[in-house]
Amino acid sequence: MPNIQEYHRDKEGSNISKIVVDRDLCIGAQSCIAPGGDTFELDSENKAIVNDANSVDDSALMAAAQACPTRAILLYDKEGKQLN
Ligand code: SF4
């Protein structure tokens, strides 16, 4: 069973309304942390969790997701379309 965590995002002017972290894929590489501002942090299991879904603009959030070596972060618009 996949270990998926979903986070709602409601930042004004943003096209991204959902952040999904696949905890099984996350290896704690931390590549997402710096580009994501305050968006991501690591929990006690060394897996990424969302601290503040509205922390940064769409381009920074996209960069954070793309920085993940295992593609553990997926971003969706409000129609449910995957953006990365
Ligand atoms: S970059 Fe990917 S693998 Fe690394 S902590 Fe972030 S979500 Fe996990």
Image (cartoon, rainbow, N blue to C red):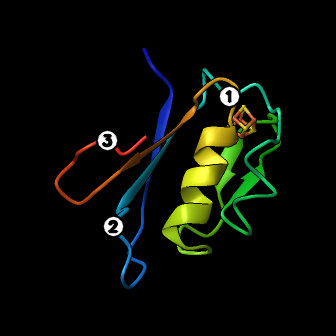
Q: Image quadrant of residue 24?
A: top right
Q: Residues within 10 Å of mark 3 (few under 14, many from 20)?
A: few
- Upstream in sequence: badge 1 or badge 3: 1
Check disc 1 and report the residue beneath it.
26
Q: Is residue 25 above or below residue 73?
A: above
Going by the numbered disc 3, the residue's amino acid type is Gln
Going by the numbered disc 1, the residue's amino acid type is Cys
On the rendered structure, is 21 left or right of 12?
right
Check disc 2 and report the residue beneath it.
15
Question: Residue placed at 36% from the left, 45% from the top?
Answer: 83
Location of ligand 1 given as a quarter of the image: top right
Q: Is residue 43 above or below residue 72?
A: below
Residue 6 image position (x, y, % from top left): 43, 47
Front one among 42 and 30: 30
Quarter of the image with the C terminus is top left
Question: Residue placed at 78% from the left, 53% from the top?
Answer: 33
Q: Disc 1 and disc 3: Cα gap in Å?
A: 18 Å
Instruction: State the count of labels.
Output: 3
Question: Residue placed at 77% from the left, 46% from the top?
Answer: 43
Secondary element at image label 2: loop
Residue 59 image position (x, y, % from top left): 54, 63
Q: Is mark 1 within 8 Å of ligand 1?
A: yes
Secondary element at image label 3: loop
Going by the numbered disc 2, the residue's amino acid type is Asn
Q: Is residue 14 above or below residue 64?
A: below
On the rendered structure, is 33 left or right of 25?
right
Q: Is mark 3 within 8 Å of ligand 1?
A: no
Check disc 3 and report the residue beneath it.
82
